[in-house]
Structure formats: structure tokens, C-alpha cells
Image: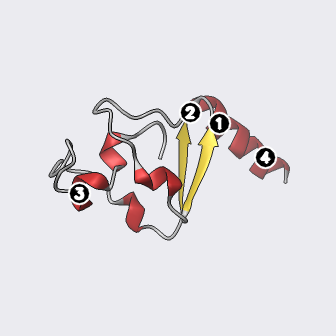
Amino acid sequence: VIGANDVVNPSARTDPDSPIAGMPILDVDESRTVVVVKRSLSPGFAGVPNPLFAADGTLMLFGDGKDAVLDVVAALLNG
């Protein structure tokens, strides 16, 4: 997941009192492992905290999306 927040927030599906309740989301929280690339832990446009970021199967990589992906690709290529 690169840069997304509200569209991957499981609160839209699990919390009927959330301001984003019922909003269509990508169910990435159902993955065994998910890597999220973001500049910070700031809430998205809706201002709702995202529990995905603290989930056991979530790996957070902080930084600019393009730079982070290029760094990961370079690390994989250089072993």
C-alpha cells in the first residue's frame, strides 16, 4: 500500500460509529502481511485513525513513496 489511508482503513467495515462507516475500502487488513509506505502516521482526509497501521501483520515503511520503492528495489537487486 503506497500513500493510502482512508481507503484501507478497516474501521469503515468494523466500526458502525466511524465517520467512514460503510465507505468502500480495499480489504488489505485481511492479508497475512501488508507493507504500508507513508510519510507519517497522520490520519487521512477523514481525520480517522487507522488501526491497520498498528496491526500485527503490518509493516510500516516511512518516507516518500517513490523513493521508498526505489530503495527497496535497489536493496533487493544488490542482495
- Distance, label 3 to label 2, CA atoms, is 29 Å
Three-letter code, disc 3: Asp
Q: Amino acid at mark 2?
A: Gly
Label 1: how many residues lie within 10 Å, few (<14), some (14-19) or many (20+)? some
- Sequence-first tag of 3 and 1: 3
- On the image, the x and y values in percent for residue 20 come to 21, 44
In percent of the image, x 62 and y 37: which residue is there?
A: 62
Residue at the (31%, 44%) spot, across then down? 7
Q: Amino acid at mark 4?
A: Ala
Would residue 19 be found to the left or right of residue 26 on screen? left
Q: Nearer the viewer, residue 43 or 30?
A: 43
Q: Secondary structure at mark 4?
A: helix
x and y, in percent, of residue 29 in the image: 40, 62
**Mark number, residue 68:** 1
Residue on which the image places disc 4? 75
Give the structural element (helix, strand or loop) at label 2.
Answer: helix
Q: Is tag 3's residue or tag 2's residue first in the polypeptide sequence?
A: 3
Provide the residue designation for mark 2: 65
